[in-house]
Amino acid sequence: MKSEIETYLNESIKIKTELLSNSVETIAQIADISVDALRAGHSLYLMGNGGSAADAQHISGELVGRFKKDRKPLPALALTTNTSVLTAIANDYGYDLCFERQVDAFVKNGDVVFGLSTSGNSANIINAVILAGKRGAKTIAFTGKDGGRLRDNVDVCLRVPSSDTARIQECHITIGHILCSIIEKRLFG
């Protein structure tokens, strides 16, 4: 069992070390986009499926509540949290439109829309970011190694150098925490 634990931790460390070598500039770019939008009075919208939905909610919660600083709440909404909306859209229009319809209802020019997808191929995420881009929102993806189809449909794609869903999601939440810290420091000192 100790060997299995060590292997797991070493794999996580290896992926994060690769992320450190290859993605700092991309993370900084995402932080700049987010801070600029929030300073201008715009909102952040986040979405994902399964564990990525949980990560979207987690990041949103840190921004609306607080990360490390007592400060005013920031406008960040996870599009995964209203089960009545999600199930109505999925039932009436199909699951592939469950986020696109919400983007259509809420997203405005200057907002930022985050799509979290380990594969980068979630149709509901792709549909939503395409519409968000047409609306004038900045679009950001957190994906795995190759970025899937999502990579070519967003302004910025942060690709975690792994194909292992667990390792990718571990990095996504780490990046989310980094962004929350930077946003708080830049907006609130």
Image: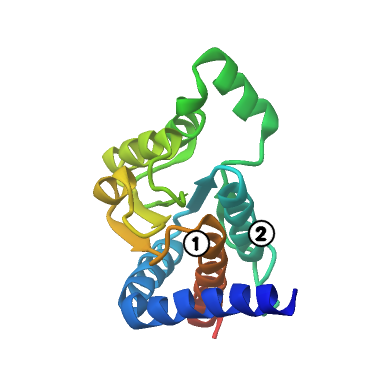
Residue 67 versus residue 121: which sits nearer the camera?
Answer: 121
Q: Which tag is nearer the camera, tag 2 or tag 1?
A: 1
Residue farthest right in this picture: 1
**65 to the left or right of 188:** right
In this picture, is 159 found above or below 184?
above
- Disc 1 on helix, strand or loop? helix
Q: Residue at x 64, y 59 (%)?
A: 58
Instruction: Measure the alpha-carbon separation of dots 2 and 1.
Output: 20 Å
The residue where tag 2 is placed is: 61
Mark closest to the chain's N terminus, 2 or 1: 2
Q: Residue at x 52, y 46 (%)?
A: 47
Please name the amino acid that badge 2 sits on: Gly
Q: Residues within 10 Å of mark 1 (few under 14, many from 20)?
A: many
In the picture, the quarter occupied by the C terminus is bottom right
* Residue 137, label in figure: none
Q: Residue at x 55, y 72 (%)?
A: 174
- Reply above or below: 159 against 125: below
Percent position of residue 146, x then y: 31, 56
